[in-house]
Amino acid sequence: MAIALALHVVFAVIWVGGMFFAYMALRPVAASLLDPPVRLPLWSKTFGRFFPWVWAAILILPVTGTLLIRGGYASASLHYVQAMMGLGTLMILLFLHVFFAPYRRMNQAIATQDWKEAGRRLGQIRQTIAVNLTLGVVTVLIASGGRLL
């Protein structure tokens, strides 16, 4: 159970922390310093390096969460565990949307140097990441204080 808990926490931190860094630090600097022909490929390559970690997280988090429940770490009937499971599922669905729709279309637009369309798709990704980051922070708050509620 200790390994499952450690993996669960590490991959939650990687995913939520990565979104926080991208949204709160990289995004404003890139937008203020770089023109679209440089900024948009930067984002494409950044996501290309970050998204494999998110794929690992969306595989590992449900598995380790289930192991923790079955191992007696928490009961699946507890409201805070159900909230984490629901929010985690929603986060996964939002990531799948980003990956298979705007991210893919942004890369296609970059390949044809359609900077306006690529920028529009990046805007969609940014909005979805803002929602996912909020859900991730709420999930972390629930995870860290749920037993106390």
Image: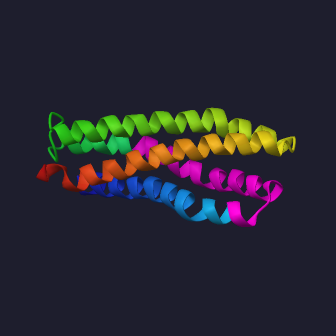
Residue 35 location in percent, x, y? 80, 59
Q: Which of 64 and 15 lies nearest the eye of the viewer?
A: 15
Would you say 105 lies left or right of 92 here? right
Residue 87 location in percent, x, y? 35, 38
Tell me, yes or no, whether the highlighted magenta stretch contains residue 61.
no
Q: Which of 76 and 147 lies nearest the eye of the viewer?
A: 147
Would you say 92 lies left or right of 84 here? right
Tell me, yes or no, whether the highlighted magenta stretch contains residue 51.
yes
Residue 71 against residue 15 in the figure, above or below: above
Q: Which of 116 and 10 lies nearest the eye of the viewer?
A: 116
Residue 82 against residue 123 in the figure, above or below: above
Residue 138 against residue 62 in the figure, above or below: below
Residue 108 location in percent, x, y? 78, 38
Residue 13 against residue 138 in the figure, above or below: below
Q: Which colour scheme is used?
A: rainbow
For the magenta stretch, what is the residue range? 31-60
Q: Is residue 45 shown to the viewer in this render?
A: yes
Residue occupying image coordinates x 13% and y 49%: 149
Count the numbered circles shown.
0
Would you say 149 lies left or right of 111 here? left
Residue occupying image coordinates x 56% and y 43%: 127
Q: In which quarter of the image is residue 23?
A: bottom right
Majority secondary structure of magenta residues:
helix
Q: Is residue 66 shown to the viewer in this render?
A: no
Farthest residue toward the right? 112
Residue 2 location in percent, x, y? 24, 57
Residue occupying image coordinates x 56% and y 58%: 22
Farthest residue toward the front? 32
Would you say 122 lies left or right of 1 here? right
